[in-house]
Each structure stands twice: as C-alpha cells, then as structure tokens.
Amino acid sequence: MELKIELTRQPKEKPADENKLSFGHIFTDHMFVMDWDKEHGWHDAKIVPFAPILMSPAATCLHYGQEVFEGMKAYRTESGEIRLFRPQENFRRMNESHDRICIPKFDEAFLLEALKKLIEIDADWVPHTYGTSLYIRPFTIGTEESLGAHSSTKYKFLIIMSPSGAYYEGGLAPVKIYVETKYVRATPGGTGFAKTGGNYAASLKAQDVAAEEGYSQVLWLDGVHRKYVEEVGAMNVFFVLGDEIVTPELDGSILSGITRKSAVEILRSWGYKVSERALDIQELVDAYHAGTLKEAFGTGTAAVISPIGELKYNDLVMEINHNEIGEISQRLYDELTGIQWGKVEDRFNWIVKVK
Amino acid sequence: MELKIELTRQPKEKPADENKLSFGHIFTDHMFVMDWDKEHGWHDAKIVPFAPILMSPAATCLHYGQEVFEGMKAYRTESGEIRLFRPQENFRRMNESHDRICIPKFDEAFLLEALKKLIEIDADWVPHTYGTSLYIRPFTIGTEESLGAHSSTKYKFLIIMSPSGAYYEGGLAPVKIYVETKYVRATPGGTGFAKTGGNYAASLKAQDVAAEEGYSQVLWLDGVHRKYVEEVGAMNVFFVLGDEIVTPELDGSILSGITRKSAVEILRSWGYKVSERALDIQELVDAYHAGTLKEAFGTGTAAVISPIGELKYNDLVMEINHNEIGEISQRLYDELTGIQWGKVEDRFNWIVKVK
Ligand SMILES: Cc1ncc(COP(=O)(O)O)c(C=O)c1O
Ligand SMILES: Cc1ncc(COP(=O)(O)O)c(C=O)c1O
C-alpha cells in the first residue's frame, strides 16, 4: 500500500519545559489515518496534520464500543537516536484485539513502517530528558453511519502521538493498591485480553471509589471465583513470594502485557524462578502473615515498573517491604529503562531504531 | 435550563416509500445536543440541524468506551397522534447506565420535554404505516481531549432519530437462536445491566459465529456458572414452562428491558403465573424432553415480541411449538403493539403524548 504524506503548514509550538510534561494532553503536528470498507479493505493510508475528525453522530464506535487501541513509546537516547521497544508486539496484540471485536486485521509490517515514518516527521517532538518519551496511540474505530447493532462496515485506523513526562517525578515511588471485591473488570469468554474501550469503561467506577479512599488503583480479582488475582488498572502484577516470583497466568481475562512478558524474560535470564500461574488472594494474605511476601510490583508501558507499597484487602492492610522499593523491582526498572533509553545493552534484540 | 432551537434551512427529503424503511440508516432533520463540563454541569441544551460532529481524535469515547445509549420509539396512531411508550423508563435507565460508567446524571424531566419538542419539530418524519415508527436514540459520550484512562471531564448528550420500518415484513415470524457456550457477554459486578457500548462490542463475535451457522441471534448464559439463561442480543427472554411463564431475574448482568417489564405486567394482569428467577439451561432441556416447553419469545423495543421457533444447545436442536407462533406470544404482541399504536386502551397509563 502507498503511504501519502501531507505536511502541516502550521507547525505548533513544542512544549517549553520538558520537566512539566504530563500524560496525553499535547499532540504532535501529524497523525496517521487509514480507512477500511468492504470494497477496498484497508486503503488510503496517509500522514496528515493532526486535526479533529468529522464524525456522524450515528457512527458505530459512539454507540456499540467497536474500538481497539494500543499504547507504546518512542525513546530518545543520549546520542539523539530515536527508538521503539518491541513495537511488533503491540501491532500483533492489536490485531488480536481486532479479531475479538470483529474489526478486520491489518498488515503489521506496513503499519510499523508507517509509524516509523510518522515519528521521523515528528522527530522533534520526542523529548530529550531521561524518563520522558513520545507516547504513541494507534487506535481503530467503527465509523459506519448506522444504528444496527452489528459489526461496522467502515473503520478508521489512526495513530496519534503525545510527548509525555517521566512517570515518577522524584524517581520510583511505591503505590497503594486496593483489592476490588465488588466490581469485576473481565471474565473468561469476555474481552479482558483485548485492548478495547469497554474494559476501561467498566473499570472507571472502581477506580473512582479507590481514589476516594486514598488508593491509586485497584487490583482486580477474577469474575468467576472472585479470588484469583488478575491485574491492576493499566498494569500486570508480580509478587515475590519467598524465592518464587509469581505473576497471574494469561487466562483470557487479563491483558498480555509487553512489559510483563519482558520482565519475565529478564528475571529468568537472571536466574530467578518465575511462575505464571493462578494466584489466590488468600495465598498472598498467608504469605504476608508468614513474612514471605517480600515484594510486589506492577508492569506497564506507562510506569515501566511500579512498586506496590501497600495492598488493602477487605479490612486487612498489608504493608509490603516497609513501603519501600524492593531490590528486584529496582533492578528490573533499571534494566528495562536502561534498554529503552539506550544505557544498557539490548541483549534480547528488543529495540527497533526509527532511523 | 433553557432549550435553544436552530431550525434547518435545508430540510432533507423524506423517505419515498415507507414500506421500504430499514433500521437506523436515515436520520431526521434535527438533533438534540447538550454539553457537560466541571464548571457548568449539563448546559447549552439545543436543538440543531442533524450534522456530523467535529471530534478530537483523542476524545475519551474513542479510546475508553465511556459511552451510554438508549433506544425508544415514537408511534403514530391512525388519527395522526404521535406518542411515546414509557419514555420516563428509558431516561431513568439511562441515568443508571451513566452512574455505572461514571458519567454525570442529567435531569430526566427536562430531557423528556426536550425530546417531545424535538419530535414536534420533526413530526413529519414519524412514519404513518402500522408497525413503522420513529426510532429515537439518546446517547452520551466522553469528549475530553486526553489519553488519561480516567473519567472524562467533558461530555456530550445527543438525541438522534431515525424513521424505521416494521420489524417483521410479513407479520410475526419465529427466529432460530443458538445457545452461546464459548463467549460471555457480561458477569455480575460488570456492566451487563447498563446500556453501554462495551457490552455490544463484546457480543459481536458470538453473533457473527451464530449468523454463519444460520442462527439469527445467540442466547447468552451467565459468565460464572455458564448455565443460567440471561438474554438474547437486544432482547430479554421468556419461556412458557407448563403453566409457569419464566424470565431470568435481574441479577445485574442483564438489561432491565422496558418491554420485559411491560410484558410481565400484562401477563400478570391476564392471570398468568410469571416468575422472575434463575433459569438453568438444563431445566429448559428437561422441559423440552418432557413436552412442557410450550413457547419461547424475546422482548425488546425493536422487535416488540419475537417468538423463538428453534433453540440449539450444543448438539441438541429444540424445536419449540412446531416452529410456529405461540398463543401467548401472539396475544402479547397484539396487546403491546395495540397500546403503542393506539388500537388498544392504554389501561396501564404507559403512553406519553407528544402534543
Ligand atoms: C489493562 C492493562 N493491563 C496491562 C497493561 C500493561 O501492558 P503493557 O506492558 O503492554 O503496556 C496495560 C497497558 O497497556 C493495560 O491497559
Ligand atoms: C442487551 C439488551 N437486552 C434487552 C433489551 C430489551 O430492552 P427494551 O425492552 O427496553 O428495549 C435491549 C434493547 O434495548 C438490549 O440491548
């Protein structure tokens, strides 16, 4: 497929102070757009100036949630090189989400090339400070103008990009997490493994309640037994239990995180015993009382590694590792960010250079 | 709140042949729009010409599925009167959906008045043929321009309307339904009772598979035990088992249908025993074998009453009432449509006249 390019005539001003960048509020000068219809399949791929889109109020995505997204980052090394971290994994996962939500699949290799071109054009938007990055948001929406509750016959695939600040202002900081016992995010047979809007809409209520109680996120339990640990907001979770590192297995109701996968590979390469298995919340409680719950952390593109300093389950408040960053969490954070920002050797071949 | 009105200068042509109206493809001349932000709450309510809306590609609703909708109809009687069927119930349910998806609630009485005004303005769009109607779609979307996965700080509430054809071209016709055993639509603690996009996105895959196998819709089972009957696509379900009429209870994972509620009230007024209770699919299979599964039907705004002529569960194909319309289904259909189109006395006080 050909990639058309139309450059902006009104480049915007870049953020003045990179230390004040927040998350997802500012957008670069350009975006990628591609359309799908029954006759042409995916077609009309183009890079155009970032701008609002004109949408019918009857567009499928506004009613029936037929929408899928991804999240990844472009990093700038000290030498000025711009690079991506395992972007093929994001496009692969996106196609899996497409499949679950009945959106036609796309050519992953073409999209990776289009993304690289888009970043090249907006290269000056990739921030320079260590820890800052260009957040990349590919997404697909159903755009048929019709109220029938069936798969859309028209789609738009877009990529928008936003320079984003370091997740931790003063370095790695432990978070307080609340174990959700009332609301459920996903269940096997549902859409939990897909990155689709409905999963996030379903989770807002619990997040709001947690925030009111002073917790930054919730830890979800499975929807069937209401006892197996699943994941946290936009992160997968790991627990250091004695000399075993446990992360919930991919059972179809949690997202298959790319940071999760990378963490498992790194930890194993260091000789740790890592288990992907069902993890009963009671096992965590028992380990806490036995003194073997040594560390807990979340993994995700946004936070990289997020140590969990406090975990509340019903009336039990479990302080983990004295509410301090654990050794393994810190080492993993340094390794992952080191690879991403080019300070540590890319021994797994995860980096894709933009140019 | 004041309601501003801006009439179109370019009225569209109305559909030439009312017998050829399909569902949700043609829209009337006007729509209702209202905005929400933290400072003003719901404000700037207005009726404007139906037109595409300009939307940031970063709008919350396109990523995190923060969207809620309703579906109701305006009916024209033989004498030309235009009327709604229990519209207060739709706005009440919509506010419940808002609450689950963390969208601020709205003033239901104001919205009903605004809707009446909108219908008055577009009155000529309400079709005349018995069985046809004006389908009404109120919906709310999160419109904050930001990629943070939290509740939006801006919303739009819209109402669009579409003249729609009779659901059954040649009168009531039984449908074939397939009991879904792989995919799950909703689970307690989730969003099943809310009319929000994600529930519909989650259901597309199973619908597609059912369609390939020649079935028109799927019957969902509960997500925990995978055996309790829930609902069908956009309908609640009823089964006549001996002299008991059973419909699944409202357990939080199915939609509280307004047609369901009305059917229960009508059936009880006729002296039938109606139970809202858990219904194991095995009980249906046993009743089928015992010859006591006499009728099955779906209820919903679109189809009103939809007799189920065939139900497939794993390898068992159950033909119900010789694949013909049952007595109770037919009587209920006649009563409900009679009340709606003004041929039967409105003895429950369900009708709201538009003017
Ligand atoms: C629900 C959910 N779980 C886990 C993750 C972590 O995935 P990744 O490491 O690929 O960013 C994310 C964020 O992408 C998420 O949204
Ligand atoms: C999932 C679902 N269940 C049931 C129904 C029936 O509800 P009502 O009778 O209010 O139209 C609908 C349609 O509105 C629906 O979307």
Image (spheres, coloured by chain):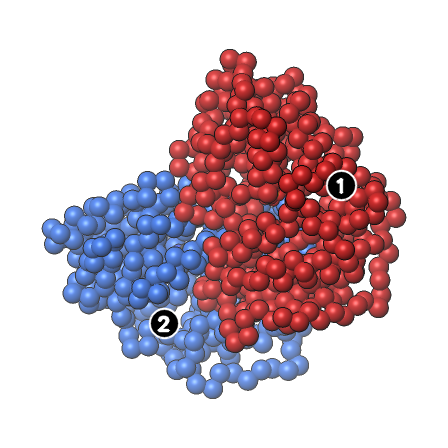
Chain colours: A blue, B red
Classify the position of ligand 2 by quadrant: top left, top right, bottom left or bottom right: top right
* Residue B13 x %, y %: 86, 56
Could you tell me the amino acid type at mark 1? Trp
Instruction: Residue at 45%, 23% (x, y): give it.
Output: B282
Instruction: Residue at 36%, 71% (x, y): give it.
Output: A167
**Which of the 4 quarters of the picture holds residue B130?**
top right
Instruction: Residue at 66%, 53% (x, y): give it.
Output: B137
Task: Left or right? Give the position of A354 relative to A34.
Answer: left
Label 1 sits on residue? B341
Quadrant showing the C terminus of chain B: bottom right
Dot 2 surroundings within 10 Å: few (below 14), some, or many (20 or more)?
many
Q: Which chain is disc 2 placed on? A: A
Up the image or down, A302 lies above or below B28; here it is below
Q: How many marks?
A: 2
* Residue B192 x %, y %: 49, 45
Q: Quick one: SS at disc 2?
A: loop
Q: Quick one: SS at disc 1?
A: loop
**Which of the 4 quarters of the picture holds residue A238?**
bottom left
Could you tell me the amino acid type at mark 2? Tyr
Label 2 sits on residue? A167
Q: In front: B90, or B272?
A: B272
Up the image or down, A354 lies above or below B258; here it is below
Dot 1 surroundings within 10 Å: few (below 14), some, or many (20 or more)?
many
Instruction: Residue at 16%, 65% (x, y): give it.
Output: A322
Q: In front: B45, or A262?
A: B45
Is the residue at mark 2 in contact range of ligand 1, meaning its CB lies under 8 Å from it? no
Q: In front: B217, or B240?
A: B240
Q: Residue furthest left?
A: A290
Image depth: mark 2 or mark 1 in front: 1
